[in-house]
Amino acid sequence: ATAPAAPVQAAATPAAPPTAAPAAPAAPLAAEATPRPAASHASAPAKHAPKAEARVTVCHSCGVITSIRAIEQQGEGSGLGAVAGGVTGALLGHQIGGGTGKDIATLAGAVGGAYTGNQIEKNVKKSRRYEITVRMEDGTHRVINQATEPAFATGDRVKIIDGRLELN
């Protein structure tokens, strides 16, 4: 095998003293690693441009239903129920007993019939209305009354237009 050739030096230049090559820096440990900022390019647009202030508009006729209550209103007696009940009660009372007992039963039947007839008339004429509470977007509460059963449920977003509710 041939030996490697010895380095040839020119006679005119003095040989430089041998120096050790600079040591390569040690790789940093994970704990010593420092984050490097991302390279920035002058031509790239800024990532975080200042945001314009968002304007929040409040709909003063919009809100959310918070409760729906059915309210029954007792009807008013016109007197017809009392008269009809009184006559019916008197006729039935007259069928009971004889003599003074018959008169007392007729009177009791008339009074009881009149009261019962009046209550029946009120019950027949009773009505139901619905009270719907809406929490408006501006924080206030409004109550809407309507005679028909609402087609809405608690939690629905609605808009109040001319005193009526509409889905929003």
Image: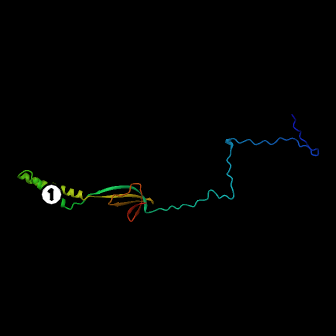
Circle 1 packing at 10 Å, graded few (<14), some (14-19), many (20+), is: many
Q: Position of residue 33 (x, y in %)?
A: 68, 44
Task: Examine the rendered structure and indicate whether residue 56 appears above or below residue 1.
Answer: below
Residue picked out by circle 1: 86
Q: Position of residue 144 (x, y in %)?
A: 36, 60
Q: Position of residue 132 (x, y in %)?
A: 37, 58
Quarter holding the N terminus is top right
Q: Position of residue 9 (x, y in %)?
A: 91, 43
Q: Which quarter of the picture shows residue 111?
A: bottom left
Q: Secondary structure at mark 1?
A: helix
Left or right: where does residue 45 sit relative to residue 160? Answer: right
Amino acid type at circle 1 is Gly
User: Among all residues in the image, which is located at the extreme left?
Assistant: 99
Q: Which quarter of the picture shows residue 134?
A: bottom left
User: Among all residues in the image, which is located at the extreme top?
Assistant: 1
Residue drawn at point x = 32 percent, y = 55 percent: 70
Q: Nearer the viewer, residue 79 or 159?
A: 159
**Render colour scheme:** rainbow
Q: Nearer the viewer, residue 74 or 127?
A: 127
Task: Examine the rendered structure and indicate whether residue 37 appears above or below residue 159.
Answer: above
Left or right: where does residue 116 sit relative to residue 7? Answer: left
Residue drawn at point x = 15 percent, y = 57 percent: 86
User: Among all residues in the image, which is located at the extreme right?
Assistant: 12
Q: Which quarter of the picture shows residue 137?
A: bottom left
Q: How many circles with numbers are drawn on the protein?
A: 1
